Image: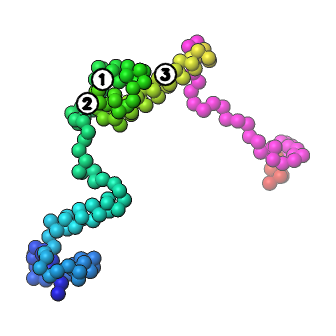
């Protein structure tokens, strides 16, 4: 006996179910109907089994540690408090707990971005000081094309331009 496949009947002849469903129906009792709820249940069970075997948690079951979904942008108070605590040597975890509106990952990303921004500003300022770029106009483009080196590939090459232009060489 095989499980029944419940599909809406639009014509007198129903198409055969896919091979995967036919194979699965051999192992399932006959009284189970294959509707979308059953398929979703089996998919969820397979995903849970996979996550158990790999040791990972299901993302939909995880609740956020802090209510951080209300605003993405950092307020000025959050920025100053975060930078002040970081300069004091406080860990990201403790900073996130003190802010109460940001997760540890958000604090870590903010501090990393702030550090990279400061390093970029220092590099630009150093370029202006080192190269005195304030007084000289910047060049645009890639610059001059280097001279061809085709002559350097042929040893003892002698160019007779008059002979080449006469057409006898061809």
Which residue bears the numbered disc 3?
A: 121
Occupied quadrant, residue 50? bottom left
Which residue bears the numbered disc 2?
A: 101
User: Relative to residue 117, is residue 146 depicted above or below?
Assistant: below
Q: Nearer the viewer, residue 128 or 29?
A: 29
Sequence-wise first label, 1 or 2: 1
**Figure label count:** 3
User: At x 63% / y 30%, what residue is drawn?
Assistant: 143
Whether 62 is among the magenta residues is: no
Q: Nearer the viewer, residue 130 or 63?
A: 63
Whether 146 is among the magenta residues is: yes
User: At x 84% / y 48%, what residue is drawn?
Assistant: 154
Mark 1 or 3, which is nearer the eye? Answer: 1
Q: Where is residue 58? Give x, y as percent.
A: 28, 54
Q: Secondary structure at mark 3?
A: helix
User: Which residues are the magenta region?
Assistant: 134-163
Q: Are marks 1 and 3 in contact (CB under 8 Å)?
A: no
> Does the image show residue 21?
yes
User: At x 58% / y 12%, what residue is drawn?
Assistant: 135
Disc marking residue 78: 1
User: Relative to residue 135, is residue 146 depicted above or below?
Assistant: below
Q: Residues within 10 Å of mark 3 (few under 14, many from 20)?
A: few
Q: Where is residue 121? Give x, y as percent.
A: 49, 21
Q: Residues within 10 Å of mark 1 (few under 14, many from 20)?
A: some
Q: Are marks 1 and 2 in contact (CB under 8 Å)?
A: yes
Q: Secondary structure at mark 1?
A: helix
Sequence-wise first label, 2 or 3: 2
Occupied quadrant, residue 158? top right
Apparent side of residue 99 relative to residue 127 in the rendered image (left or right): left
């Amino acid at each position: 006996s095989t499980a029944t496949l419940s599909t809406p009947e639009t014509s007198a002849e129903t198409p055969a179910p896919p091979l995967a469903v036919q194979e699965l129906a051999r192992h399932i009792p006959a009284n189970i109907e294959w509707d979308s709820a059953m398929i979703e249940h089996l998919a969820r069970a397979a995903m849970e089994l996979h996550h158990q075997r790999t040791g990972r948690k299901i993302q939909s079951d995880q609740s956020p540690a802090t209510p951080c979904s209300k605003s993405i942008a950092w307020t000025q108070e959050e920025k100053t408090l975060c930078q002040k605590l970081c300069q004091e040597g406080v860990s990201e975890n403790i900073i996130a707990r003190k802010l109460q509106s940001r997760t540890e990952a958000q604090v870590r990303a903010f501090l990393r971005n702030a550090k990279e921004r400061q390093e970029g500003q220092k590099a630009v300022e150093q370029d202006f000081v080192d190269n005195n770029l304030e007084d000289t106009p910047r060049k645009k483009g890639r610059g001059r094309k280097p001279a061809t080196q085709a002559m350097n590939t042929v040893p003892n090459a002698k160019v007779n331009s008059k002979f080449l232009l006469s057409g006898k060489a061809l």
